[in-house]
Amino acid sequence: GILISFLRWVRENPVEGVFAFAGVYMITTVLFIPGSILTLGAGFVFGRAVGLGLGILLGSISVLIGASLGAILSFLLGRYVLYEQAQALMNRYSVMKSVNRAIEMEGLKVMFLLRLSPVIPFTALNYVLGLTTVALRTYVITLTGITPGTVAFVFIGTSASGLLGNEDDGDEGSGASDSSTGLVQILVFIIGGFFTVCAVVALSWYAKRYLNRIIAETEHLEQQQRLGERGGEGDDENHLQMNAVGSKSSRQQQQQQQQQQHEIREEEEKV
């Protein structure tokens, strides 16, 4: 299909392919198309074109550039152009109300955790964050939080490309050498892929746990503030009631004094 043809062209033109791939990734991000398959494809294509090490580097750079540009564009569209659509998207994720309040208190930290933890899909999060109070500068800085996951997916794609060998390899050479090389590549793919996935999963789990704690603390603080306001209103009511009771008792005392004085005058008149 079109995607296969594009990936083949990127492989044949790796330098130009970095920028072309970044452009395609930017468009897919804005259009809500999941980028995980494309990220794996970047690792596979650049790994086939330039080898494992350089393939990981070029693939990661192209994905990070494209994803970052697409995320910034989505953020601006959600804030200034597609406000109603972004609001509907935000209502779909109830956790965003608490996240928005947490951003107001600890914006930079919460934004990094959102990028590290898949609480909300990447493409949807970009639009929804346009409705929050986060500044564009903070938003751009925290996009670096997508680096670990990006490198992990590119690494897996690049390692998979190494397992297939090079199309240009002929039948010449030692079969034993080819077999040993293939075995090493398989071990690198299995071991490296395993530890890479474990690292990303552990990082995402920790980020999600820490983010949930911040959200819980924010909600608890808001509850205390609401209770404090209600308590203040109750104190005012009690104070008014006490004043009313005091006024009533003072009036009763005055009436009693007036009655006593009246009785004394009557007794004096009788005498």
Image: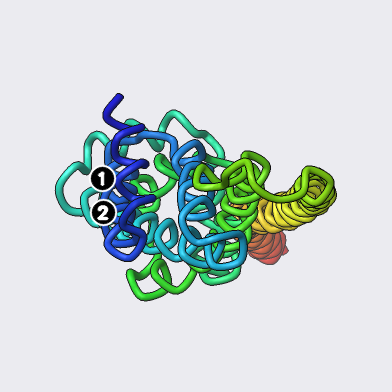
Write down the residue under mark 1: 27
Q: Which residue lies furthest to the left in this view?
A: 81
Badge nearest the viewer, 2 or 1: 2
> Image point 62% across, 39% down: which residue?
164
> Callout 2, which amino acid?
Gly
Tell me residue 19's x, y (percent): 28, 61
210 vs 156: above or below: below
Q: Which of 168 and 81 is in front in this view?
A: 168
Tell me residue 15's x, y (percent): 33, 65
State how many labels appear. Answer: 2
Please give left or right for residue 56 compared with residue 73 in the image.
Answer: right
Q: Residues within 10 Å of mark 2 (few under 14, many from 20)?
A: some
Inspect this view and state whether residue 232 appears. Answer: no
> Callout 1, which amino acid?
Ile
Tell me residue 63's x, y (percent): 43, 56
Q: Do the residues labelled 2 and 1 touch (CB within 8 Å)?
A: yes
Label 1's element?
Answer: helix
83 vs 264: above or below: above
Q: Residue furthest front?
A: 172
> Image point 51% across, 50% down: which residue?
48
Q: Distance between the residues labelled 2 and 1?
A: 6 Å
Which corner quadrant holds the N terminus? Answer: top left
Quarter of the figure with residue 247: bottom right
Q: Nearer the viewer, residue 246 or 43?
A: 43
Q: Residue furthest top?
A: 1
The colour scheme applied to this rendered structure is: rainbow
Please give left or right for residue 14 compared with residue 200 in the image.
Answer: left
Q: Which of 112 and 251 is in front in this view?
A: 112
Tell me residue 146's x, y (percent): 54, 59
What is the number of the mark on residue 23?
2
